[in-house]
Image (cartoon, helix red, strand yellow):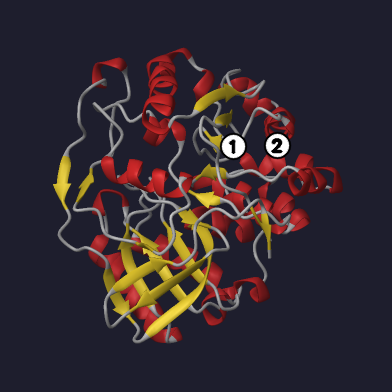
């Protein structure tokens, strides 16, 4: 596994749209402006759009090869230091036939760079994982850097800085507040805070004792389950069966898995069915521990907690619920392939290593 090296001061972000092409639509121009203002102001970063990133939803939906081309260009471009997904979506699986090949594998080995995103971007993460590159389940540009309120959420900004500075021995703390999902993203919302809620639960240590440690592997539960069952598109199952990006039981072995549910807010029965897919693949019998993201707006919170507790007991699986990653706000960063330590006695979770490597480490 290759761990991308540390980020230099004044680094350039290569912006890609590997799922939704909404970044290129006129109705998000005010959000693009926020990205262009905040990347340099908050993080000292420059931004560069990949050639097809602003061509809009219809074009990118009809041309997955152009999405794939942008990812290749981002790795090859000497000006680009970080590759950041603008947003998730539901069809990035269609880039797989254009990327799962020896040419692209050689590109990422020769020019490894940090890759950030979440949600449908799980597909891109696991593709890159299978090709040997460690990436970051992290806030996206449109959802987080372009947060319409007066500023990026402090917790989110702090976590991005932890990544960019590759801090070590980072204690994962629960955000003291969370924010309800927006229902409108138009210009009238500029400068308007989302509704803030006090965090009443914190990290919930559902099951386990002692200290558990393992490398991180996971993603959005909907994306993970659809890699096995297919999903909303007729060709989805066929593509996944051909390219096999879902980790093998051996790859899951000894890992600390992370999973979270999407903005679709699946009901408890749907959650059970998606977990059953992973169960059938031997995931829960192989992993060493499980961390679970906060359900969006705490919808089905109690029911989810009960389902995960039952799962943990069934597999004698150390499990912590309600972390700030995935489809919730604010969001943290989880580095694929890096070790995380859970201390149940202290109720403490620590990212042991720096999230980035030293000059593109190989392991």
- Give the label on residue 83, or none: 1
Vertical comparison of 54 with 8: above or below: above
Helix, strand or loop at mark 1: strand
Q: From this viewpoint, is residue 315 visible?
A: yes
**Quadrant for the C terminus in the image:** bottom right
Looking at the picture, how far across and down is residue 349, in whole percent? 35, 69
Q: Residue at x 50, y 79 (%)?
A: 288
- Residue 346, percent across and down? 26, 78
* Residue at position x 58%, y 23% in the image: 48
Would you say 361 lies left or right of 10 here?
Answer: right
Q: Nearer the viewer, residue 249 or 170?
A: 170
Q: Nearer the viewer, residue 83 or 236?
A: 83
Find disc 2 in the rendering and name its residue: 75
Among numbered discs 1 and 2, the one appearing first in the sequence? 2
Q: Nearer the viewer, residue 74 or 356?
A: 356
The image shows residue 286, relative to residue 175, as above or below, that is below
The N terminus lies in which quarter of the figure? Answer: bottom right
């Amino acid at each position: 596994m290759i761990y991308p090296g540390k980020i230099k001061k004044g680094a350039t972000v290569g912006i890609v749209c590997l799922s939704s092409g909404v970044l290129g639509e006129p109705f998000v121009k005010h959000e693009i402006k926020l990205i262009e203002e905040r990347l340099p102001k908050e993080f000292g970063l420059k931004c560069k759009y990949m050639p097809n990133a602003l061509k809009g939803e219809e074009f990118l939906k009809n041309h997955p090869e152009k999405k794939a081309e942008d990812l290749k260009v981002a790795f090859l471009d000497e000006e680009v230091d970080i590759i950041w997904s603008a947003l998730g979506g539901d069809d990035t699986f269609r880039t797989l036939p254009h990327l799962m090949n020896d040419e692209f594998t050689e590109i990422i080995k020769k020019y490894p760079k940090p890759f950030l995103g979440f949600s449908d971007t799980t597909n891109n993460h696991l593709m890159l994982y299978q090709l040997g590159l460690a990436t970051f389940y992290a806030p996206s540009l449109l959802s987080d850097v372009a947060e319409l309120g007066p500023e990026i959420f402090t917790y989110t900004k702090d976590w991005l800085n932890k990544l960019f500075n590759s801090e070590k021995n980072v204690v994962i703390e629960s955000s003291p507040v969370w924010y309800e999902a927006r229902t409108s993203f138009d210009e009238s919302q500029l400068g308007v805070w989302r509704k803030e809620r006090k965090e009443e639960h914190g990290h919930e240590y559902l099951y386990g004792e002692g200290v558990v440690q393992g490398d991180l592997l996971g993603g959005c539960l909907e994306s993970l389950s659809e890699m096995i069952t297919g999903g909303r598109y007729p060709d989805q199952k066929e593509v996944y069966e051909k390219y096999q990006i879902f980790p093998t039981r051996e790859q899951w072995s000894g890992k600390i898995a992370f999973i979270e549910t999407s903005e679709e807010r699946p009901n408890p029965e749907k959650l059970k069915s998606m977990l059953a897919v992973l169960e059938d693949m031997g995931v829960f019998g192989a992993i060493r521990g499980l961390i679970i993201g906060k359900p969006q707006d705490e919808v089905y919170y109690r029911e989810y907690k009960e389902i995960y507790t039952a799962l943990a007991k069934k597999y004698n699986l150390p499990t912590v619920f309600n972390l700030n990653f995935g489809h919730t706000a604010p969001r943290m960063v989880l580095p694929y392939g890096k070790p995380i330590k859970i201390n149940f006695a202290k109720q403490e979770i620590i990212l042991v290593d720096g999230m980035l490597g030293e000059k593109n480490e190989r392991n």
